[in-house]
Amino acid sequence: MDLQASWDFRDPYEWMARVGRSTLPPTMIGVALTGTMHGKEANPNLPELIDEQIEAAYEAYQAGAISVHVHLRDPENPAVSVNDSALFSKVNEGIRKHCPGMIVNNSTSGSALQSATEKIASVFADVKPDMCSFNPGPFMLETKFKDREAPLPAPRKGYVNDTCIPITYGDIRYWAKTMKEMGIKPEIEIFNPGQFWSLNDLISKDLIDPPYVVQFVMGFQTGSYACPQNLMNMIDNCPKNCIFFVPGVGAYQLPMNVMGIVLGGHVRVGLEDNVYYRKGELAKSSAQQVERIRRISEEMNRPIASTAQAREMMGLPPA
């Protein structure tokens, strides 16, 4: 099986040859279990506590996910996200124990009020992750939170959060340099084509190593609209030696995932990105979304990558 995950996605002749010979690389499925915004008030099946996240990671792993994207919530107030290296160690350790070989990918998103150092607490976990994600530029968002009603812990009234996440070139270089020194591979979450300026800056300064793992977050506020033209534009802007993943936010999750598979890339699913399975039907779990995209990929003649294959494709050491 051809495990060359980095190739010229823009070359129509190479794409046709790979499709015709069934030599597209196996599809890597990442999963994002929970995020920094909506919690169980949006879907009661969304995991909040550490034990819930470990169990959800195991279910997704059994379904075919090769990596898990980890956000943390305050154990005393699960409605609120936190960055805490000790808690990251705890969830990383649990995932490693129950999901042998699964790639642990901690988030560094943080809040608008946190410093660049506070945002990368996940990097300094005693149980070190394989990867960490970071955003290569600022963005603003207006988020509407539903009422969080008892018996959920930490109930509160719904509200609207109108904020801007500031990120500078200095922040990005600091994160990349720190990860490189600690042997952690960055996953760069690109929300719009302007952020390729940041990616190419890191490459030019030798702060990240190939293959470069990028993720096109399609449909997030002030990011690119989730439509075919914009995804194609993102791919056209990729520098050489890139591997791309495609998540879609909300209703755009499934079509963006499928386009990622068609174009020779890889996908991310999970309740962080979409709490629904289909219109009007809440997802039972992130694993349910993994199972669906696995079926679609296999029907399209792209088998699912194992964790060992995924590590080889992304230049990560064996588990």
Image (cartoon, rainbow, N blue to C red):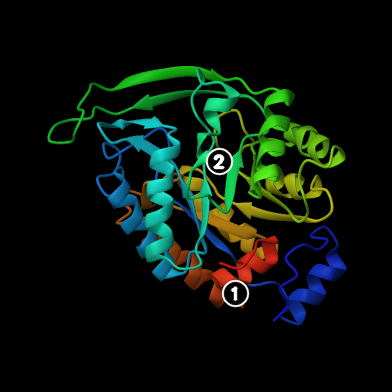
Q: Which mark is residue 123?
A: 2
- Return the residue nearer the eye: 8 or 59: 59
User: Is residue 246 visible to us here?
Assistant: yes
Q: Secondary structure at mark 2?
A: helix
Residue at position x 54%, y 29% in the image: 119
Q: Is residue 56 left or right of residue 234?
A: left
Q: Residues within 10 Å of mark 1 (few under 14, many from 20)?
A: some
Q: Secondary structure at mark 1?
A: loop
Q: Quadrant of the N terminus?
A: bottom right
Residue at position x 86%, y 62% in the image: 11
Q: Quadrant of the C terminus?
A: bottom right
Three-letter amino acid code at disc 1? Answer: Met
Q: Vertical placement of 106 versus 158: above or below?
A: below
- What residue did someone put label 1 on? 300
Residue 275: x, y in percent? 37, 46
Residue 116: x, y in percent? 60, 25
Which corner quadrant of the image does residue 313 belong to? Answer: bottom right
Three-letter amino acid code at disc 2? Answer: Val
Q: Vertical placement of 104 versus 168: above or below?
A: below
Residue at position x 82%, y 57% in the image: 10
**Cα distance in 3D space between marks 1 and 2:** 37 Å
| CB within 8 Å, label 1 to label 2 | no
